[in-house]
Every structure is written in C-alpha cells, then in structure tokens.
Amino acid sequence: MIGKSRKRAYVETYGCQMNISDGELMEGILETHGYEIVTEPEEADIILVNTCAIREHAEKRVLGRVSQLCGLKRDNPDLIIGVTGCMAQRMGATLLERAPQVDLVMGPDGYRSLPDQLAALVEGRKLRPSRSAKKRGPQLAILDLQLGENYEGLDQRRSSSVSAWVPVQRGCDHRCTFCIVPYVRGPEKNRSPGEVLREIEGIADSGVTEVTLLGQTVNSYKAEGQSFPDLLRSVARVPGIRRVRFTSPHPNDVTADLLEVMAEEPAVCEQLHLPLQAGSDRTLRRMLRRYTVEAFFEKVEMARTVVSDIGLSTDIIVAFPGETRDEFEETLEVMRRIRFDDAYTYRFSLREGTPATRFPPTDFISDEEGQKRLQRLIEVHRGIQAEINEAEVGRLETVLVEKEARGPGQVLGRTRRNKVVAFAGSPELVGTYQEVRLTHTTGATFVGELSTAPASMGSA
C-alpha cells in the first residue's frame, strides 16, 4: 500500500526504443525516490502504463490493458494507476474521462516531476476521499511540453546487463504529415556531449559493452559545436565499449562524414537504419519527407561504398492518402532494387493532430485495400530477406549473446550487422561475445553453431 515505508512501482512499456528508454528512466527516478521496482502489476502500489501514439491499433491495445489493470483496484483500493508517454500526451485529459479509474496522465516531458505528482495524489486522497466506484479521489493531467527538458542528470534503471539505450536527442523538428511525434514530444532537444559521454562511461564501468544512441532523427544531433558524427566518434572511443549502434536517422542527414566514422571506428557496427517510407516521389512530397527516390538511392550507394558489408534496414508505409496502385508498385520496385536486409512495414494509420488529417476524404484508402498492399509488401520483403540470408549461411560471425532463446538449451545473439542468431549454449554465455557459424536460416533469423575459435576483440 502507499502508506508503507517502501512503495512498490510497476512500469509496463509499449512502443519504440525511446519508449523503452523512457520506461527505464521512470524506474530510475522512482527508485532514486525510495520506490521498489517490481515485475508484476499485482505486487504494485503504483502502476504506470508507458504508451505509444504512432498507430491507432497500439492505442486501442493500451486502452484495453489499462481497463484490465484497473480491475486490480477491487482488491487494492489504494492502487494508483498512471498512463504516461505519447498516447497520454495526445489524448490529454480526455483519457481521464474515457478511463475514470486512471489517476494520472503524464506526457513525455513530465517524468522529472513524477515522484511529486504521485505524492500529490496520495495527499489529495487524504483531503478529498471519494466513495465513487468509478473514481477514487483526485486525478492529475501533466501535459506541458518543456522546451529545455532532455532529462540530463537523471539516472535510468537499466533493464539489460548486455546492451544499453542512451537517448541523445528528444523531440523532432521535422513535420512529416503522417507523424504525431513532433506534437507529443515537442521540438528537437539535444543533450550535451559531455553528459552523454559521462553516462556511457558509467555504462562501460558497469560491464555493459554495447550502447545504442537514440533520437527521433538522431543524426541531426548538434550541441555545443559538435555534430552527430563527432559524438559518434567520441562514443566509439569510450574504453570498454565494443559495439555502438544508433537509431533512427533521417536520410537527409546521412552524410559522408557520418559514414566515414562508421567505416573508421571499429566499435561502430556496420548497420544503418534508413527509413524510406515510400518509393514514389509524389507520395514522398505529400509525406513531406524532403528527399526524392533518386536522392535516397544515392544515400544507399554511398553507404554501401564507404562502409564495407553494411546491413541496411528501413521503414515503409503503404496506403498513404492518395497513393495510387502504380505508386504502390513503385515502392515494391524500389524494395527490389535496394534489397534491404530488414524492413518494418506498416499500413497508414491516421493520427488526429497530424497534417494528414487535412487531406481530402476521397484520398483515403480503404482498410481492405490497405491490408492487401501491406501483405504484398511483406511478401516481397520476406522473399528478398530470405535470399539475402540464405546467401550468408556458412559465414563465421561474432555474436553478442543477449538472452536465453525459446528453444531449450539455446541462447540468442546478434551480429554486428544486426542479424539474430539462435544457437546451442548455456545461460552463462549471456553478455559474452562468441564466434558462431551460421548453419541455416529461417528466412528472417539464423540458426548457428558455436565455433571452437575464440572470439576476437577486434571483430566484436
């Protein structure tokens, strides 16, 4: 219960890597203020559901989960339930009306004040107790976006002993017509390079050897006279860090300087996520992506020329308003031409508050047609991915072992190029680098076998 000397908090996160990092941040803030972090909601005095607002389906899923968690109040009337993150920011106080048993709604810039807001809720219950079966006491909505809030000086509670997420940038200055992020996370806010490096030095001192730098358009980072390539080079040279990744870059800021750092610094992985979104110039203009298909091809060619054996992944949206069948076919053709190692594929989801809501109603594509296009895109991508991975069977790869696999007696690891490999091994291998021979592929992932050769530091 809240009155106990050591309160218990449970954080459940949905969405992207930045949301995962935010969940760790909230856990760190609460732990610093005396909370015990628990792994099951039934054990908690405070439940925080950390949310995503990118797609409507994700929001519906979260609302269902919140309703389910609110049922725990029957057994624990003092339980406080909060909804945080992008969905909380987008829906605002209306979320308190739709889910009256929710006590706290907090956007992405409110986390620093989280302990104070929870204390205010507890105090408010003492002053204004409620007998209502639907609403037990006061509710709070913390929704102001803070122009300077980048959470410097606060500790994250790392959920992994193998790899760490490190936000270097929050918010976004782009205004892609399909994207809600600038409206729920605010404008771009970059952390100081010194603060980032101090955090990563601490991560390395803890024994974690892989970090992923996070930002909405991470490679547009600029702070205190340093560009993102400058920061990336510095991070790659932190003693104890063996692998560095970053996501999610914008194609326009993939420069020769960035690729040179990737090629020259041994710790930087040969992996680049390059969101295409669409393979039609007309659709890209309507998305406000600010590049052409040909310019994107040039970025891909430059990356493959400068960084040997680079692995490329992408994001694709189909059924964007006004996308014709011919333009969809153009996207498929671009996929065939570039041959991405991996792709995250989506059907367009309209988000209230984005510029896409202003397109004429006749531009919107039916769910049935959108789903057909998505299925075709997935089929094309999976076919390409299977061909690429089949050609890589037999390679000897250095794998960072991340966790136990689903199969008994197996562990799961990842190559420098972000290929997932399952192989026979004991749990003691988690966190180590192992040489693994790729023996066959399932299409998207690999099965391998442990090599007798020792893992090389230089090939981590």
Image: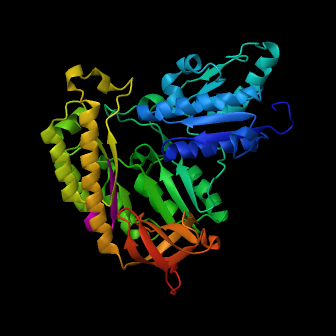
Q: Position of residue 7 (x, y in %)?
A: 80, 37
| Segment colored magenta | 303-315
- Quadrant the N terminus occupies: top right
Residue 259 shows up from this direction: yes
The answer, for residue 280, to whether it is visible in the render is no
Residue farthest to the bottom? 452
Residue 313 is inside the magenta segment: yes
Residue at position x 55%, y 39% in the image: 150
Q: Position of residue 86 (x, y in %)?
A: 50, 32
Up/down of 451 relative to 306, above or below = below
Task: Reply above or below: 24 against 447.
Answer: above
Residue 11 is situated, as x and y percent measured from the top left of the image, at: 64, 40
Q: Pick the residue in front: 133 or 342.
A: 133
Q: Quadrant of residue 342 in the image?
A: bottom left
Q: Residue at x 61, y 31 (%)?
A: 68
Residue drawn where x is 74% and y is 29% of the image: 79
- Nearest the viewer among 456 and 204 is 456
Residue closest to the far left = 326
